Each structure stands twice: as C-alpha cells, then as structure tokens.
Amino acid sequence: MTFKVVHYINQFYAGIGGEEKADHRPEVREGMVGPGMAFQRAFGKEAEIASTVICGDTYFNENLATATSEIIAMIEKYSPDVVICGPAFNAGRYGVACGAVAEAVSDRLGVPVVSGMYPENPGVDMYRKYAYIIETANSAVGMRKAVKPMAKLALRLARSEKIGSPKEEGYIPMGIRKNMFTDERGSKRAVKMLVKKLKGEEYITEYPMPVFDRVSPSAAIKDITKAKIAIVSSGGPVPKGNPDHIESSSASKYGRYSLQDIDDLNSENSETAHGGYDPVYANNDLDRVIPVDVLKEMEKAGDIGSLHEYWYSTVGNGTSVANSKKYAAEIAEDLHAHGVNAVILTST
Amino acid sequence: MRLEVGSILIKDVQFGSKTEVNDGVLFVNKDELASIAGDDEHIASVEIYLAKPGEQTRIIPVKDVIEPRVKVSGDGGVFPGFISKVDMVGEGQTHVLKGAAVVTTGKIVGFQEGVIDMSGLGAEYTPFSKTMNVVVKVEPIEGLHQHEHESVVRLAGFRAAEYLGKAGQNIEPDSVDVFETKPLLEQVKEYPDLPKIAYVYMLQTQGLLHNTYVYGVDAKEIIPTLIYPTEVMDGAVVSGNCVSACDKNPTYVHQNNPIIHDLYERHGKNFNFIGCVITNENVTLSDKERSSDMTAKLVEFLGADGVIISEEGFGNPDADLVMNCSKIEKRGIKTVLITDEYAGRDGASQSLADSTEHGDAVISAGNANEIIKLPPMKTVIGYPEVAGTIAGGFAGSLGDDGSIIAEIQVITGATNELGFGYLTARGS
C-alpha cells in the first residue's frame, strides 16, 4: 500500500514570493510543490505526497486561529497517514507556523507530524511536544541533509513503527515523559549505575534534573494601610462541600470563592480539599490554612487597606508544575484586574 | 550482624480449621485471625477475605501490606516496639511465608490509600497482584480521629501478620539466604580493595498521617542514625502513613527492601556494602537542614565512596532528596538517587519540585500522573466509591460499570522509590 502524506510549506518555498507575498492566504494544491519533490524521491513508491498546503508566514502568524482552522480543514480532506511541516530551518515565523500546524494536526486529527528546524528556532520551544522535529542547519543550504532523516522518520510513523529515543532517531527531545516497563527492577538499575559511576564509566541518568526559573520578589508595599490584600493558597481551602470538586491530588483546576459574607472560617462554612495531610485541624478551623479571621479584623481596624473579596485556591499535592503555572497566570490576571496590591500565599 | 532468612514458599492460601502451612499451602483459621487482628477496644469489626493472583478481585482502599515473618532464633521478635518488645532484631534466623501477604483495608482514613487489582491491566503495576493475599478489613468504632483510626488499622495488620508468620515457625524453609554486615572496622577490612558503599534510606515523616516508625519511635523525632541492614528484615522499620499509594513504602517493602537485597547481592564482588543510614523527611527547613547535614556527616564518617539514596513520597521530600544528594556529593562521595516523577498527565511538566546539578545519576520509577483505565472486577473487597477521593482519583473516576479511570498514583506500589518495581519513565 502507498501511504498518504500532506506537506505544509510557506509562500517562499512554494515559489510564490518572499516577504512581499507573506500575506498569502492558505491554499491547497494537489501533489508535491517545491521541497516536496525531494521528499517524494526519498519516499520512492512507499508514500505519496497527496497534496501540499501553502500559507504565507505573515498571514498565519497574524491570524493564528483562523489560519490553523482553514489549514486543518484542507489537510483533513486527504486523510493523511503522516504530515510533514517544513523544514523551516531558522526561519522564526515559518517555524512557529509549522509548530502550530503540528499541534493542531496531532490534537485534532490524531495524525503524526514530522518537521525540521534549527534548534534555536522559536517554533522548537513552543511546539516540540507535538512533532518529531529533526534538527537541521540554520538555512536552506541544509535542505538535502534534512530531507533524508525527515522522510525516513515519516515512513516509520506511517508504518506505525515504534519510535526510539531522540538520540537514536535524530529528533529534538519533545520533553514528554513516557512510562515503560524495564527488565530489571529499579533497585538493581541503581546498583549498576552506582558501580559505573564509581568506576568512572559512562552511564545515562534516567531523569535529567530540571532547570528552574527564579522569580524575583516585588518591591515591598510602602503603605500597608492603603493596600488591597488577596489570599491565594495551594492548601486546598474551599467552601464546605468543595463545590468545584477540586481533586485531593493532581488538581485539574483552581477555584475562586467569595469572602463577602464571611468574617471567620469554621467547620460549617469551609473545609480543605487537600489530600496530602491529615485534614482534621484544617477542617475544624480553616483560618489555620488561610488567615481570613485575622485579615478581616485588620481590615476593620484599618491596619490594612482592604481584603480582596475573593480567595483563590487549588491543591498543590501532586499537581504538575506546568498546571500550577497556568493557574497562577490566570489568577494573577484576575488579581491585577481587581487592583490587588499584595498577596498572601499559603501552602501546607 | 548476621541473619539467616529462610523462605517457605507459599503456593496457595485457603481457609481451614487450623492456621498452618502444609505442603506450601497456607491454611488460615478465619475466626481466630479475625479475633487476634480485632483485639482492640477501638475496633468494631474485622472481616477476612482471600485474594489470589489472576482472580477478578479489587481491594480498595488499601492501607498497608505486610509480610508474615517469625523469629526462629536470635533476640527479639518481629515488629519490635509494636508487636514484640523493643529488643534489637536482625540476628539469628527468621522464617518468611514467601508469597503470602496481609493486606489491610476498611473505611478510608484519609485520602491517600491505594488500589490492588489481582488481574487485568492494573495488576501489572502492583507487586501485590502476585502475592497470595489475606485481606483484613478493619472497621473502627465511631468517633475516632483520623490519626487514631490509622494507628488502630496499622496495629491490626501487624497482629495479623505476626499470627500468620508463626505458622512458619517449625517448617523447614525451601531456601535460606544469609545476610551479614560486620561492625564497621571489621567490615572495611574484609574487602579492603573494594569501594565502600552505604545506603541512605529516607523515611516518610511529613507528619499528619505521613509517618514511619523505627523500633516503635516516630522517625520524625530521630536524628539520622545507623542501622544494620538486617534489622530492617525483622520489621524494625514499619509504615504508618497514608501518603500516595504509588510511592509510599508499605511495611512489606521495608521488610524486603530491594536496595538492601541488591546491594548484598554484589557485596564482596563489585563493592563493600558497609551499612545503612536512616534519615527522615520532615517539613520544616531547619529539620531538613539538620537531617541532611547529619546524613552527609554519617556517610562521610563511614568512609563511603558512594551511596544510593532512596526517597519516599514526592513534592516536599524532593527537597530532602536534593539536599542529601548535594551535601554528600560536595564531600566527594558519589550518589545515585531513586525517585519517581510527577510530570503531569501529558508527561510534559518537570518531574521534581527541587533540583540540583549534583543529581546526575537518577533512577526513575515512572510518572505517577499517567492515566490508567482499570477494568471492572467481579469482586471488590472494601469501598469502590472512594476511587474518586483517593490521591490520583478525581470526580467521575468510578464508572457505572465499576471500571476506574485514574492516575497510576492510586495503585499500591506502582512507582515505588525503593526500586521494588519495573516501571520507569523516559523522555521522548
């Protein structure tokens, strides 16, 4: 059988024009165009480029959502076994377009995608988890060298073969951790790794340590008696009954809850959703997790300007850093919109 | 210290009129076991079930798993400080009913209790789908606080394991393994040319239902100390915690600590296994600093060239793991770490809550956030409705047909950080 491939390229590689034609709207052409010829040669008879989708880089980047939908509709018609985007080398906007198309193809159509980019192309960082991105040179001079591994990987994906590690296959690590079973239990692997490390032999760590971003603290509040204070917590404080069903671990959401009619948290009006600690003391008096009672008193006494009318809550237990960042960004936006000056963050 | 561990292979478990081992079959007098396990004024009822490999049986929520053992010679008895007097253990001879296990269940204590499936996909993730399980379902009296409830069930499990273990007292074991660690200076002399290896054994002690006990002492209260590896095999270290099921160490895994076993296996060949440091995972920074300082000091004091460091739990204890690693490496001693990962359901997030450039040799026990669908089972021992509440479950986890969709976090032992299992994760 012959596998079907759809190829995505920009206006430049389609021969339509350079920057002056970058507003070219999405179009689809039957068969191969431009670099598609080299891919077709590499495929031989095993796969065929059924169509080529072309879009100007400026148009794509300025109309991300609509351009993506138009392009997906075009690709979907051909029911491809695999989609190739680019290669984009170090062209930033082209790389982003290739990545965004890859994300939509893998998410909406469930079809694997192969692309090619220079490692510093911004498209790599933004979209590497959605496509097998072969590392290329930084310009089209590297076309021939890029096509061969891209075509090879595309054929293997079309055949539904098991894809090896980034090192083995030559793609840029996607940063996705996948579970698998091994032949030797973990303790035995640890002993073997230690023996190698002691001998100065080569070993490969199973988890390269993460690199953290650092947040520098904001300047101190000058006059706390004028400041609007908010409470944000990863200790799981929620109104009684946990109305949003925030999970006890690996929270998939956060909640925003009103403090308007509350001066004091107690076992009647609140509880914790957190599954990482004995909840007895938190459930008896949730002020132990978020100090609502004290802040309300301070607000009345004029010690602080005001207490923001909502508290924000999620469960930190087992919740991924990526999700935490997402919730934090949304919460920060809401705090900003409400003119909050300072936040008390509590964990457990 | 020298311990002979005699394994009596248990091929089957059945109820019978007398508790005994006969030709590899463990017969259990149900009523006697229930009355011994339930011998506590805080217990309202005890029920006993059997769950065997391959059966369509689910146990939920699982609190602890314990291996039946008995001291045949040498000082003390199993679970010193709880079941037996506090005499030091780890010498002489111990018999093990290998292949049998006590599993405790009952009304949920907290959130962090687990699932064991005896067949189907979930069975591949838990070591306890391969054991002949005597399930002890304990219901406490009304009005107990959670920490009291936990303690009541924990002790009931130990009583049950001790009772069953005694059935192996006078049985000829199928095999005997000898484990020996000598006093330090002698041990060093035994293999003077081999590199010296120690084991840093981190115990879950975050408190509030996250506790581990050493000879009956809450390990939160200890300063890191030395222990002979064989002491652990007699139950000197026991679980008292409700941390997520996938990466807490059930008492069974302490008794069978795989790092200790695999270090002994190559002891005298590739290295000289000189001893074990136990330390804790307390929540305050000053506790963390003190414990990691003491741990690094003890490892240096032993003269170790390298260590394996194992974690228990995740998140907050990642900081202890990282501090132990960097402080030991800074003394010129090489480390290998064992941890599991919380990389998010899509595997795209960073996996640890803390990091060190010294952590260049890490064994991963898998991503606990990965989603799994567990098929419905014919028999459910316990309370399936807690599937949505336990750590790793979510609203809607329990399907109408009895299937469960949840993170593998819910499965007892799925990502064990003593390296007891075969699961791992790799980057793509």
Image: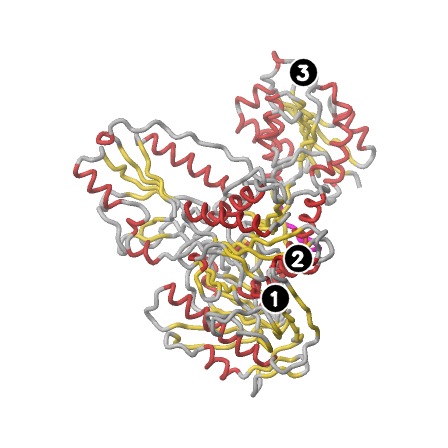
Tell me what residue is drawn at x 66 percent, y 57 percent. B263
Nearer the N terminus, badge 1 or badge 2? 1
> Looking at the rendering, in which quadrant would you find the C terminus of chain B?
top right
The residue under label 2 is which amino acid type?
A: Leu
**Can you see residue B90?**
yes
Mark linked to residue A16: 3
**Can you see residue B380?**
no
Tell me what residue is drawn at x 21 percent, y 31 percent. A225
Mark linked to residue B263: 2
Question: Who is closer to the viewer here, A182 or A47?
Answer: A182
Q: Position of residue B302 (x, y in %)?
A: 59, 52
Q: Classify 10 Å Cα crowding around label 2: few (below 14), some (14-19), many (20 and above).
A: many
Quadrant in the rendering for residue A259 = top left
Q: Classify 10 Å Cα crowding around label 3: few (below 14), some (14-19), many (20 and above).
A: some
Q: Label 1, on which residue?
A: B1
What separation in Å lies between label 1 and label 2 (alpha carbons)? 16 Å
* Element under disc 3: loop
Tell me what residue is drawn at x 59 percent, y 70 percent. B91
Question: Who is closer to the viewer here, A80 or B162?
Answer: B162
